[in-house]
Amino acid sequence: MAFDKYETYREIKSQCAAWEQALDLVTALSLPKAADYDQVIFTGCGSTYYLSLSAASLYQELTGRSARAIPGGELLLNPQTVILRNKPSSRKTLLVAISRSGTTTETVKAVEQFKRDMLGEVVVISNNAETLAALGDITLVISKGRENSVAQTRSFTSMLVAASAFCMRMAGGDDLLSAMHALPQAGNLLISQYESFAKEIGDQLNFDRFYFLGSGSRYGLACEANLKLKEMTLTHSEPFHFLEFRHGPMSMVNEKTVVVGLVSQANASHELAVLHEMQALGAKTLGFGESGVEVAFRSGLSENIRGVLYLPVLQLMAFYRSIAKGLNPDRPNNLQAVVKLDL
Ligand code: F1P
């Protein structure tokens, strides 16, 4: 069967070229210093909120400064729950707004409100030079990440690479930033090595529920993998932090369950223990990580810069399950590429 006729498939397979462009764009930016800001807020909706979760964790880990993620709709309706109002002595807030389309109403309105209240500067990461891009003090448009399908794949990873590179630069980690240039090649290799594995899992329709476990900056990626499965395959799926899974969710585990672990190097023993326990309860478990797991990156890259490698094989798994279920992965149920509201 020719899978090339699906836009989603072509976008997944061509994503690594967009990573290259993202890295070049971030390298050329002139940026402020992390020390200029009391807090950094990352915002977006759906996939781009999940991207924000991952980026905020990475930002704080690398810079040692406070960062958090908030959905665009929450920043718009409940800003007092996140924004530190500037005292005369305090520094400003930096808002990083992320959106594939650049036109999602909640994200655009939240940024407009933030600017109206003069709370600080705005960085925009997008794939399109649309409304949001015009609101940024610093704007990054990764055109090679643009896509025609509804579910974000290439766009997501292109903006994730950009956001991660942005964090590296804010932290002064130029050596890590240049090491990131090895990612596109590592990504392409991974796709070619594990595409048939992704299909093999995707084809098994006896599985009826999927759980994605990730901790630290990998939690946002677990959320995104869970969303891909929902959007493309209409399957019950949920994300959790690794150790949270024992606190209730594991009641759902049976022989129809797949538990995917986005395993880190730093906490591998704790995380693999969860996977082993779920396997003993009957689940099919799949570990993703640098080595010693079912899908091994073998990238030689450091933990902080290889996060994007967790995604392409999981995107392919969702694509193949969608096909196996007789669905159209390009057109998820009830969903538009952009949510526009009349607020
Ligand atoms: C965000 C988003 C997507 C989701 C859906 C609706 O869009 O929530 O993540 O898959 O297609 O829109 P954007 O602000 O990143 O363009």
Image: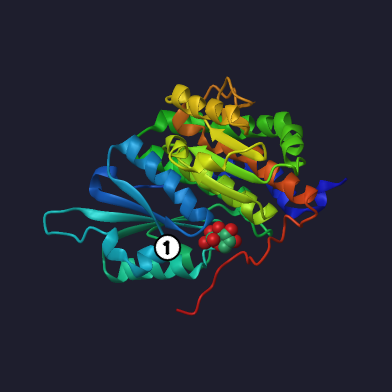
Relative to 227, say whether 299 is above or below.
above
**Mark 1 residue's CB less than 8 Å from ligand 1:** yes
Q: Front-most of 156 and 266? A: 266
Q: Front-most of 146 and 65? A: 65
Q: Where in the figure is residue 207, as x and y percent of width and height?
A: 70, 42
Q: Front-most of 113 and 311? A: 311
The image quadrant where one finds the C terminus is bottom left
Q: Is residue 13 left or right of residue 176?
A: right
- Give me the residue at 27% from left, 50% from top: 39
Furthest residue in direction left, as rendered: 89
Q: Quadrant of residue 331?
A: bottom right
Furthest residue in direction top, as rendered: 292
Relative to 110, say whether 300 is above or below.
above
Q: Where in the figure is residue 110, as x and y percent of width and height?
A: 38, 67
Furthest residue in direction right, as rendered: 1
- Give me the residue at 62% from left, 48% from top: 154
The image quadrant where one finds the N terminus is top right
Q: Where in the figure is residue 335, as x and y percent of width and height?
A: 63, 65
In the rendered structure, which amino acid carries the disc numbered 1?
Gly
Q: Is residue 196 left or right of residue 254?
A: right
Q: Where in the figure is residue 155, as x and y percent of width and height?
A: 59, 51
The residue tagged 1 is: 72
Could you tell me if residue 210 is visible in this image? yes
Q: Residues within 10 Å of mark 1 (few under 14, many from 20)?
A: many
Q: Front-most of 300 and 138? A: 300
Q: Quadrant of residue 311?
A: top right
- Give me the residue at 49% from left, 37% from top: 214
Element assignment for label 1: helix
